[in-house]
Amino acid sequence: MDLDDGHGTPLAKGSRQNADVLSPLGSMSAVRCATYAIRFGDVPLMRISVVPPGPTAVCGTPLEGTLDFEAALGGDIVSLAAAGGSTHAAGMHNVRVTAVAISLDTLESVAPEACTRGAQGRVVRRVRDEMWEATGDTARCTFAFHMPQDATPSFDNGVVRLAWQLEFVFTLDHGVRTGQPQQLKWSLPLTVVPCN
């Protein structure tokens, strides 16, 4: 399901395997940012604001954002579920995000009809920049990536496709010791355009 800004302009598409949009609220502030309220089931986790509002980014310009753990409501609501896990298990009301990894990625693919048999359906993900932050005792944190001046803009010519995205990986603590920390992923697709 697509998110929009309330005027029919698409903002982002949640990663179908990891996130589902519950309702578009299209919150824009005076700074002109797109805002997403991230939830784990019914539990609000954080609010993510991204500048420039998008999902359009321009080569040679910054791409910045804020993760606000105190103001978890407001913005386009995105509900995340762990692979194979339930969002309604005991202790879910105590969920908190203890770490966040964010990466600026490109996804490169070739249409199946243009591939040799061994390469069909393959998508190459390249991490262009990344950051990690411990957030267990943090009210908010920021991220900033710089789109390279000579970055290849997004394109799809029917044979080759190059897409950009911000990928968020959240490490959760909900008081239940399972041996492995629980991680959730959400991807925000970006359209990268050349600078003028």
Image (spheres, grey):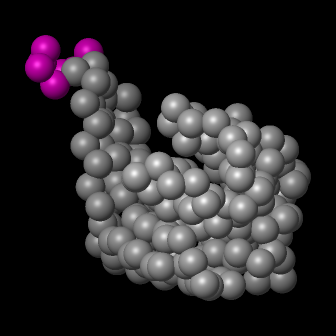
Whether residue 191 is visible: no
Residue at (70, 35) in percent of width and height: 1
Quick check: 174 left or right of 121?
Answer: right
Image coordinates of residue 174 in percent, x first then y, are 62, 58
Q: Nearer the viewer, residue 140 or 53?
A: 140
Given residues 180 and 37, the one toward you in this image is 180
Residue 22: image quadrant is top right
**Where in the figure is residue 47, as x and y percent of width and height?**
73, 68
Q: In the image, what residue occupies the spot 46% across and 79% down?
A: 133
Q: Left of 1 or right of it: where is 107?
A: left
Q: Is residue 153 left or right of residue 91?
A: left
What x and y, as percent, mark residue 178? 47, 49
Numbered range of the magenta stretch = 113-119
The image quadrant that residue 59 belongs to is bottom left
Give whichever of 12, 68 is nearer the camera.
68
Is residue 151 shown in magenta?
Answer: no
- By secondary structure, the bulk of the magenta-drawn segment is best described as helix
Position in image of residue 33 (x %, y %):
72, 73
Name the residue at 87% across, 54% down.
25
Task: Answer whether residue 96 is visible to the viewer in this image.
Answer: yes
Vertical order, 88 against 102 (above or below): above
Q: Is residue 194 above or below residue 66?
A: above
Residue 148, quarter of picture = bottom left
Residue at the image position 55 percent from the left and 78 percent from the top: 135
164 relative position to 77: left or right: left
